[in-house]
Image (spheres, coloured by chain):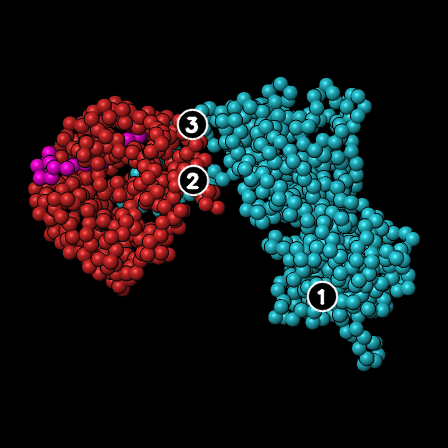
Amino acid sequence: MTPTERIRNFCIIAHIDHGKSTLADQFLLRTGTISPREFREQVLDDMDIERERGITIQMHPVTIYYSCSRPGTSDAITYELNLIDTPGHADFNYEVSRSLAACEGAILLVDATQGVQAQTVHNAFLAMEAGLVIVPVVNKIDLPIARPEETVLEMEHSLAIDPKEVLFCSAKTGQGVDEVMRALLERIPPPTGTAEAPLRALVFNSHFDTYRGVVVYVRVKEGILRRGQRIRFMRTGREYEVQEVGQFRPAMKPCEALGPGQVGYLTAIIKNIQDVRIGDTVTDAHRPAPEPLPGYKEPKPMVYSGLYPVNNADFEALREALARLSLNDSSFTWQPETSEGLGFGFRCGFLGMLHREIIQERIERESGLELVHTAPNVTYEIVLRNGETIQVKTPQDVPDAGQIAEFREPIVRINFIIPAENIGAIMQLCVEKRGTFIRTEYLSPTRAMLVFEMPLAEVIYDLYDKLKSITRGYGTMDYEFIGYRPADLVKLDILVHGKRVDALSTIVHRSQAERRGRALVKKLRREIARHQFEIAIQAAIGSRVIARETIAPLRKNVTAKCYGGDITRKRKLWARQAEGKKRLKQVGQVEIPQEAFLAVLSEDEEN
Amino acid sequence: MLLFHKAWAVAGPLPLPLKSSRYQAEPRWFWPRSVYVHVPFCAHHCCYCDFAVVTGADRLADVYLDALEREMALWLAEPIDVETIYIGGGTPSWLSPARLRRLLTIIQQFCSYQRGNVEYTLEANPDDVTEEKLGLLVEFGVNRLSLGVQSFHPATLRFLERHHDPASIAKAIELALKHISNVSLDLIFAVPGQTLTDWHNDLARACQTGAQHLSTYNLTVEPKTALWARVRRGQVCPCDEETERSLYEYTITYLEDHGWEHYEISNFARPGYASRHNQVYWSGEAYLAFGLGAARYVGGTRSSNTRSLRSYLSQLRAGQLPIAESETLTPTERAAETAALQLRRRQGIHRDRFRQQTGFDLDTLLGSALRRHRNRGWLEDDGVTVRLSRQGIFYADLVCADCVASAQSSSR
């Protein structure tokens, strides 16, 4: 056990691609935690998808031993640094707050070529609110296009960072990394808490291991956690005997005990990940602490979408895949649902759009199932005439208009950080999207922060793409849920060949219904292949049809000739056609491709 | 479920040069009994053609024949017994009598065939048909002539950039039939400007000629052809789908009414004259092929030669095979492909023979696709064979693609 004065617990706050993982890898290399031979790029990102996308989703803590000389002497002191990696995307906010609760300090890492981004501001404020000491660092100073002075100015304006405290480094070349490490030791306070007090350890994450059961990630606040100890989870009341305690170095390495301030894991033959609540407090069953540590709020899914197997026979396999996935990701929810058009599937709840995409990709990759996913929607609140309030997670559940007293939608506060020249265009976009302007702030003469309140539904409906295209990629955004507000909403239905396709229904604002309806049927006309009969595509509110397009019948699809027995060419044609067939879902007589179900997600440029 | 056999265990192209004596007992999908030879030379590159064709390169003909001979020698360690030979192009008939003799001699050297049994075809341009060339063909046992007539209608011929006139076609056919009893005509429909009456006349004229075989092709605008460029520039308006379909429908009705057997999507024959060589392709059986851009299927591997004349010649000069693409099919791919190909035959897929040929049970392999298209009325199924219905013919590619997709997902 390391004495608390030699422990520093910290995390790194950074925007995607600002170099967080590279900096973490530098720490590991410099302290010999991993050898250059073991060094893979971005060691802490384990999952394939994380590596491919260069983003971190789940936290992987790591314990580093760092020796440095006492100022003015030659004796070396070894410090224990616990780095808790944090995700860098808005969807994973709650994971950020978990990491923060386990730390005393945070490196605020900003890319000198990109400047402060919306996500950075958001997470930095979270860290400040949590009382963490901030170590501001400007990264990528080795790049010729770096503009470190401006970046410091932006940090000052947006986050009130003292320019004198800012460090400069290049995580890639290693320049300035030693200074950053020294600053960690000097500026971040050691943890408090005594070994004599009754055990209190914060559960900040967990994962499922086939051999060991649930691996619980803990930060000991006070007392000592030992192997063989009888422990109790204070909120659930469950008791276990600790099988193993250890540290992440970065692989799991058992040790005898974890003392105050230390970060590590415990296993206790816990079979079900749902039995361990993130944010719970672990205490000694024989000498329990009087009060648990303050927890943090459970993440609530904000975006829902339906997941259906292309072959209905794969329903059970999909259920197993979802169950397997939720072992390691307790933040997404799923329950069976039935769609007239799509058959049996699941309604899944996600933290946000990226979360949704990642989950879907993982399911498909890990299970090999072919899936149709419906366009995502947010959770609505409806007050019925009888006074009852219901939560609506899918447009199918919207009751008849006559029963609705009030239709409410979720509202978020959204921050944009954009080039100043785009302020006008973004303002206009937000007004179109029913946004309410809150304020503007200039971070520097060329960059500004805009704050709006806006329906979440509008945010998931192509806002991000529009932001990126207006600002040519330079704008970023971040949002947080602030509450439900009443709005004039209607359910827009789509009929294909006279049949209502429930999975294509959406909830829209009445003022936009007609425009959306027209755009949608037009788009669907392009997505749905011609059949041997004519297909009408209609958009309707209740029984009133507001838009219609027609798909002409296919009369012929046969190639005449095959030159000199060149079958390969023919087979390629079939293979191409077969590929296109992969995600077709039969609805009535019509085959609807996956793309059509996502058509409701965005408008075409031409519209 | 799969049947295994020693020679089939090869997971890749067979070792070259091929010793035919070693494989002769192998099944027809594995060991070829058919040979295709490509002659790329043409007097003119027609606007719709995207095949491996060379114009204005007469001086290369001798070099080409040298290369062809070398290619055959690289493939074949000893002569191979064949049942069908097809010399296509290009325009093989464009070769001078001396070169034609040399070509036929080379083929004779590497292929052993019995005159009474072989189906030996040469593709010819009506303008090239002369007593001298016909005599030469007969001397070497060529017993089938495929004439690139395309149309009897002057405007259609002009559009297709075919330089023969209707009168010379009739003469050529007559002359050909004097020497070679089995004559096939190629006809093209859905040519811009062509009316149903024009097409009816073409079919009627073809029926009167005494030809035993007709290939009717819907004009396809292939990418990168001159025709394609004209369509893109808006100079030519291609035929619409509805017209194409009615012309095709008319073709089937008219020819069947006049005693022709519709044996494959685009091919019709007088009883007993269905092309055996063509049917090798559509049955998923093996065949060898030589020449520019030629595609073959041997020992479960499909491969094709480069389409660049220069690299074809230079690679062979260096003693290398000019293969551009090669692909060894997995058992499932082979079975799926066989099913899709056989569906193009009007006789369809015979379940027992399919199982024998591929080792797969047709219903297990294609189950859902068969059911779907049966319900749609595009497939007919009497329990023994499955074939496209009259309605299904018009959607053959969709059905075939669906079978391929179904086979892929059932093997997963």
Residue A339 to residue A385: above or below: below
Q: Colour of chain A?
A: cyan
Q: Position of residue A404 (x, y in %)?
A: 74, 22
Q: Dot 2 lies on which element?
A: helix
Residue located beneath label 2 in the image: B364
Residue located beneath label 3 in the image: B376
For image coordinates 64% across by 61% down, the residue present is A42
Which circle marks residue B210 in the picture? Answer: none
Q: Position of residue A229 (x, y in %)?
A: 82, 61
The reply to the same-chain question for discs 1 and 2 is no
Whether residue B179 is in magenta: the answer is yes
Q: Which residues are magenta?
A: B174-192
Type of residue at label 2?
Thr
Q: Position of residue A494 (x, y in %)?
A: 59, 26
Q: Which of label 1 and label 2 is nearer to you? A: 2
- Marks 3 and 2, the one that precedes in the sequence: 2
For image coordinates 62% across by 41% down, the residue present is A319
Type of residue at label 1?
Lys
**Measured Cα–Cα span from mark 1 to mark 2:** 51 Å
Q: Is residue A442 among what the camera can see?
A: no
